[in-house]
Image (spheres, grey):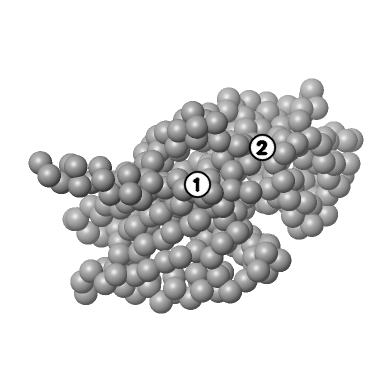
Amino acid sequence: MQIINLEGTEDTPKIILDKNNGIFEVSGRSLPEDSAEFYQPVLDWLEAYKEEANSSTDFVFKLEYFNTASSKLILDLLSQLEEIEGVTVHWYYHEDDEDMQEAGEEFSELVEVPFEFKTY
Amino acid sequence: MKYIYELHKTMLARNLILVYEGEFTQEITKSVLAMAERNMDSMGEESGIKRKVFNVMVECLQNIVKHSDDFSKQSEQKPTAIFMIGKQDNAYIITSGNPIKNEDVDNLRSKLDQINGLDKEGLKQLYKDIIKSTSLSEKGGAGLGFVDMARKSGNPLEYDFERLDDQYSFFSLRTKIAKE
């Protein structure tokens, strides 16, 4: 599968999706002008990955900030992960960022995917 | 030339650290955010409140951007809006004002009243209900932004509508983020 490797910008997150090396990561800031358009390639990639997923997938979220429009797309992304065997979501939050911790907990209540919470 | 001094005095009296009036776009949003962040950094602001202020600013600014899209399609007049940040001893005040269509006033008012009637748990539940039911095409609308602002602020969202003419009203919104 092709690798998705997007550099982060001041309003879009860094995204790496690399099946062969087992790296799946969304990090940084997410407040794009059109979040649906921005996340579509990611959702498409996961749609294809579903068909040939690795035996285990460790998906890392290390977000510093995301807006509400992005939160909807993150939920869509997590819903895709729900359909893949052996997925674990690693939700990182800054140690004093209770809001990011709570956001992760809320997502974990909305989808049937195991979450591990970690601070950085 | 007197208005310059008057404006200066108003800004000082209201403790306004940033005022922007004009057209709102994603590029403007990024610039305003960068300025406000630099400002808070230089004052040595604590990271928790900085994050909350940033959060509320983004939702507020992007609401206006989304809304001005509706306008420019159909009317020749480019609507402008205002965005302000005030800093008090124990709180930040984020305010915005933008024209909206009269037909949207009732809907917006009831949405804000609903949000203001909820406590912390109620807001959390409403957030989850909206995020679950909103479809992708709706561009993150449906009031998720206001719910998030209320959650981050921990205070009611103060608002007002001033009728401009047959078509438009001016929507003012004021969000207070208290320092812990």
Q: Secondary structure at mark 2?
A: strand
Q: Are marks 2 and 1 in contact (CB under 8 Å)?
A: no
Q: Which residue is at the front of the view, B88 or A103?
A: B88
Estimate the spatial distance between the alpha carbons at disc 2 and disc 1, rounded to whole Å.
30 Å
Q: Residue at x 52, y 60 (%)?
A: B146
- Mark 2 packing: few (<14 Cα in 10 Å), some, or many (20+)? some
Q: Which residue is at the front of the view, B4 or B122?
A: B4
Chain letter of the residue carrying label 2: A
Q: Residue at x 53, y 65 (%)?
A: B156
Q: Which residue is at the front of the view, A12 or A39?
A: A12
The number of callouts visible is 2
Q: On the same chain: label 2 and label 1?
A: no
In this view, which residue lies farthest toward the top?
A21
Residue A60 in the figure: left or right of residue A55: left
Residue B119 in the figure: left or right of residue B97: right
Q: Residue at x 56, y 62 (%)?
A: B155
- The N terminus of chain B, quarter of image: top left
Q: Is residue B138 visible?
A: no
Q: Name the residue type under label 2.
A: Leu
Tell me the number on the disc at residue B89: 1
Q: Name the residue type under label 1.
A: Asp
- Give above or below for B101 relative to A74: below
In this view, which residue lies farthest toward the left?
B1
Residue at image mark 2: A63
Q: Residue at x 56, y 52 (%)?
A: B178
Tell me the number on the disc at residue B140: none
Q: Secondary structure at mark 1?
A: loop
- Mark 1 packing: few (<14 Cα in 10 Å), some, or many (20+)? few
